[in-house]
Amino acid sequence: MVYAISTEEYQQFRRLIYDESGIELGDQKQTLVASRLSNRLRELGLKTFSDYYGQVVEDPSREEFTRLLDLISTNKTDFFREPKHFEFLRDRILPELAQEKRVRIWSSACSTGEEPYTIAMTLFEHARNPDQWDFKILASDLSTRVLAKAAAGTYGEDRFRDVPPEVLRRHFLRGRGNSAGFFKVKPHLAAVIQFRRLNLMDSEFPIKSPLDLIFCRNVMIYFDRPTQETLVNKFHRYLKPGKYLFIGHSESLQWVNHTFKSLAPTIYQKEC
Ligand SMILES: C[S@@+](CC[C@H](N)C(=O)[O-])C[C@H]1O[C@@H](n2cnc3c(N)ncnc32)[C@H](O)[C@@H]1O
């Protein structure tokens, strides 16, 4: 059963979610919010959305707030989603870095981990002598629930339909017995990824060495233009000159003020 939410209650949640995560729900998502949050109200034995709002804002641990954002955010992702970006990584970025053999990448809204594991598979598959390279991928998201799944690195077989079988075999272990039908990431792949909760709304990120590449795909679509602009200009600070930002295929920076050079519709380069 979906609990009734008044327009006033909806606007309260909308503002709270926007202030914390940058996600702009607009006026149309009232029913969606009610349906995503109703189970939680039931679990907590609450009767109204106002009661739940009170619980969220008064929780000093902020755990309920994290829970709320987990329920609201959309986490859809896939291995090798939008494959042109991985081709660009293979064909342009890896050859550029072949001398120094050091790669620093940030998957900044990584959801359940398919994106950073795809990046890592691309690096191991296409760097010459990958053992001699120094790969590091920071994979972050706002949602602790998706990050836990990402860090566990275990996925059902059906998730790998876009991964060539020999690539899957090299980087994931097939489960047996109780784990039949699942694959678990192999240690060499897991070792190059660090998972961490980061909010893209933060004014600074704990990133010390300048990056070669930032993935920020399929999240900016939920942000309004000023939020996108602030974020893209923050990303600019963390990239090495000449290096790259990837955004999602349904996203565009056309209306956003920025100093990146546009190389392709979703690939941007920081000027040297
Ligand atoms: C649709 S998924 C995109 C996953 C992946 N990048 C892809 O393209 O397949 C969007 C992710 O953005 C995360 N997200 C939303 N707001 C965020 C914020 N303010 N900071 C960090 N992550 C956020 C959500 O938790 C969700 O996992």
Image (tube, grey):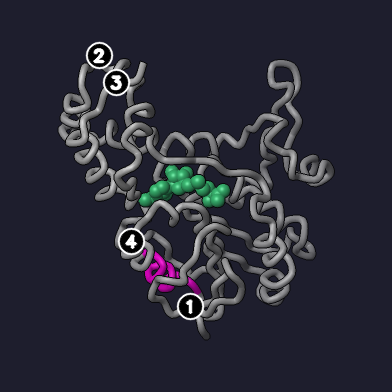
Using the numbered discs, state the Cα–Cα distance from disc 1 to disc 4 in whole angstroms: 17 Å
With 129 as the anchor, is 104 left or right in this view? Answer: left
Task: State yes or no: discs 4 and 2 in contact (Cβ < 8 Å).
Answer: no
Measuring from the top left, give residue 173's x and y in whole percent.
Answer: 74, 34
Give the amino acid type for the residue marked by disc 4 in the picture: Thr
Q: Is residue 169 visible?
A: yes
**Where residue 41 appears, x then y in whole percent?**
28, 20
**Which is nearer the N-term, disc 3 or disc 2?**
3
Disc nearer the start of the sequence (1/4): 4
Mark 1 or mark 3, which has the lower sequence index? 3
Question: Image height check: is 67 above or below 254?
Answer: above
Reading the image, the residue beneath label 2 is 45
> How far is mark 3 from mark 4, CA to CA?
31 Å
Residue sitting nearer the eye, 228 or 146: 228
Neighbour class for label 1 at 10 Å: few (<14), some, many (≥20)? Answer: some
Cα–Cα gap, marks 1 and 2: 50 Å
Please give the residue where the numbered disc 3 appears in the rendered image: 3
The three-letter amino acid code for the residue at tag 3 is Tyr
- Label 4, residues with CA under 10 Å away: few <14, some 14-19, many ≥20: some
Q: CA distance from mark 1 to mark 3?
A: 46 Å
Q: Which residues are magenta?
A: 231-239
Q: Is residue 120 magenta?
A: no
Q: Residue at x 43, y 57 (%)?
A: 220
| Badge 3 or badge 4: first in the primary sequence | 3
Depth check, front residue: 19 or 185: 19
Closer to viewer: mark 3 or mark 4: 3
Q: Which residue is mark 1?
A: 260
